């Protein structure tokens, strides 16, 4: 891809800097009007959803939400580039087996990039991105993430991606003064650390769990750190600041959902994506998104599994786009534990992450609900001191969350190493209610 479409995407994104909520809402409505007419004409699955709901396109905000399972079930008629789910999965899985991520998929609408999610929720997601969408993504990312924005291209930039899978989507940003290198997470960590130190990146992109492990090797790096794919916990952020400024990006199979501003706040990407936020209680919200740009694989009123906390105050940067205080975790990972009267109480992952992050000398952990009243703490190191401190911290956190630790079987064990390329999930629920 030439640099011109990427630059145009960046310049267009810079223009969409809304300072009032009313102006942002009007912009979204203008985008939705043209986008939905095009999508409904080219995506039989989207058109069928509007017909089934008995709604005109102008009432898109009232369309009943869909989810990942429904998206995959209708994939063949949802996408607008003529790709079947079997074909997309075959291309994506072949790339992951061979570790050759350069091929794109030829379609009647032109080449598209295919990517797969990690499948941490039990079902592997698939995404398709066209060349035009790739250029806009690259321009938006460059503007928000390069040190100094696009002015950062006045000096050479070396970007190190520490990811489970490479993608032509990422390589689209590697032009001119911007050099890109993919570090495969399936390789041994000491090798990655040595190669990264020799490469001397100015920008490091990766999951915080991987970057924290790289940091523990003693790798001496000076770069801006971009956290992706996992929740950025405060303990990881504090450690990674040894290397430089740390910001996070909220991105999923469903798209580029939130980006940092110059003040370091994480803002919803509302210039390109509409968000309805369903209340979950405890100040948490679940997003229902409508991507107002993506055409190859439309996401219209698509419900995510994440739970977000929004920041109550406006950002000093002046953007009208709402800002995320924290990503509490996936709804699938919310714990259902007994309360004082034996009732079921929901405990969100961020309560336990915050408690365990404060345990002295605890390098890494995982909390796992394995039964209706059973919680296991996997600890590294698993010593008498870390065990006692972790149990005390978790009991306190459960009390604050209105659960009753006295009704729980709460035990500990050593933490097994995370297999290479696996997404880190610090709080999980492997037990499912009947």
Image: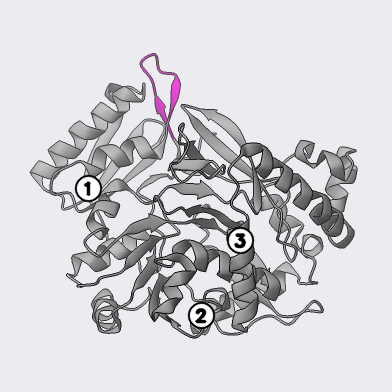
Give, as a single range, the part of the protein colored magenta: 335-346
**Residue 409 place in picture, x, y as percent:** 29, 32
**Residue at 29% over, 39% down:** 354
Rendered image: mark on residue 55: none
Q: CA distance from mark 1 to mark 2?
A: 33 Å
342 in magenta: yes
Q: Position of residue 276 (x, y in %)?
A: 65, 38
Query: Quick check: 69 left or right of 220?
Result: right
Residue drawn at the location 52% of the way across and 76% of the way down: 173
Q: Residues within 10 Å of mark 1 (few under 14, many from 20)?
A: some
Q: Is residue 234 above or below residue 108?
A: above
Of labels 3 and 1, earlier in sequence is 3
Residue assigned mark 1: 413
Mark toward the start of the polypeptide (2 vs 3): 3
- Nearer the observer, 359 or 96: 359
Looking at the image, is 365 positioned above or below residue 133? above
Could you tell whether 273 is left or right of 208 in the image?
right
Q: Quadrant of residue 297?
A: bottom right
Residue 153 shows up from this direction: yes
Q: Residue at x 57, y 38 (%)?
A: 286
Q: Quadrant of the C terminus?
A: top right
Give percent across and percent down for residue 20.
61, 39
Whether 63 is drawn above or below 339: the answer is below
Q: Secondary structure at mark 1?
A: strand
Q: Is residue 53 left or right of residue 286?
A: right
Name the residue carrying label 2: 97
């Amino acid at each position: 891809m030439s640099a011109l479409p990427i630059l145009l995407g960046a310049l267009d994104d810079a223009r969409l800097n809304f300072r009032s909520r009313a102006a942002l809402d009007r912009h979204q409505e203008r985008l939705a009007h043209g986008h939905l007419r095009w999508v409904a004409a080219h995506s039989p699955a989207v058109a069928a959803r509007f017909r089934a709901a008995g709604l005109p396109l102008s009432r898109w905000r009232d369309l009943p939400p869909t989810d990942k399972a429904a998206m995959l079930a209708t994939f063949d008629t949802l996408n607008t580039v003529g790709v079947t789910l079997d074909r997309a999965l075959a291309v994506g899985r072949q790339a992951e087996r061979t570790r050759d991520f350069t091929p794109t998929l030829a379609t009647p609408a032109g080449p598209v990039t295919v990517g797969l999610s990690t499948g941490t929720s039990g079902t592997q997601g698939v995404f398709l991105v066209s060349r035009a969408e790739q250029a806009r993504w690259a321009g938006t990312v460059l503007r928000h993430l390069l040190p100094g924005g696009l002015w950062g291209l006045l000096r050479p930039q070396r970007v190190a991606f520490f990811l489970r899978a490479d993608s032509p989507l990422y390589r689209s940003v590697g032009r001119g003064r911007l050099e890109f290198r993919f570090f495969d997470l399936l390789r041994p960590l000491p090798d990655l650390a040595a190669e990264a130190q020799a490469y001397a990146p100015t920008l490091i992109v990766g999951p915080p769990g991987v970057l924290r492990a790289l940091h523990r090797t003693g790798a001496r790096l000076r770069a801006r750190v971009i956290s992706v794919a996992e929740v950025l916990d405060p303990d990881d952020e504090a450690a990674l600041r040894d290397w430089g400024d740390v910001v996070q990006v909220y991105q999923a199979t469903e798209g580029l959902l939130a980006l940092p501003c110059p003040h370091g706040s994480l803002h919803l990407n509302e210039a390109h994506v509409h968000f309805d936020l369903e209340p979950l209680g405890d100040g948490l919200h679940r997003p229902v998104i409508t991507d107002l740009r993506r055409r190859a694989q439309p996401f219209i009123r698509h419900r995510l599994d994440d739970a977000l906390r929004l920041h109550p105050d406006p950002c000093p940067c002046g953007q009208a786009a709402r800002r995320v205080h924290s990503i509490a975790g996936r709804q699938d990972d919310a714990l259902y534990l007994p309360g004082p009267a034996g009732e079921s109480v929901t405990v969100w992952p961020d309560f336990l992450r915050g408690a365990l992050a404060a345990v002295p000398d605890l390098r890494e952990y995982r909390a796992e609900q394995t039964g209706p009243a059973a919680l296991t703490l996997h600890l590294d190191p698993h010593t008498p001191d870390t065990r006692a401190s972790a149990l005390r911290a978790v009991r306190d956190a459960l009390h604050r969350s209105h659960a009753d630790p006295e009704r729980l079987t709460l035990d500990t064990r050593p933490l097994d190493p995370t297999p290479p390329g696996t997404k880190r999930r610090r709080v999980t629920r492997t037990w499912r209610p009947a």
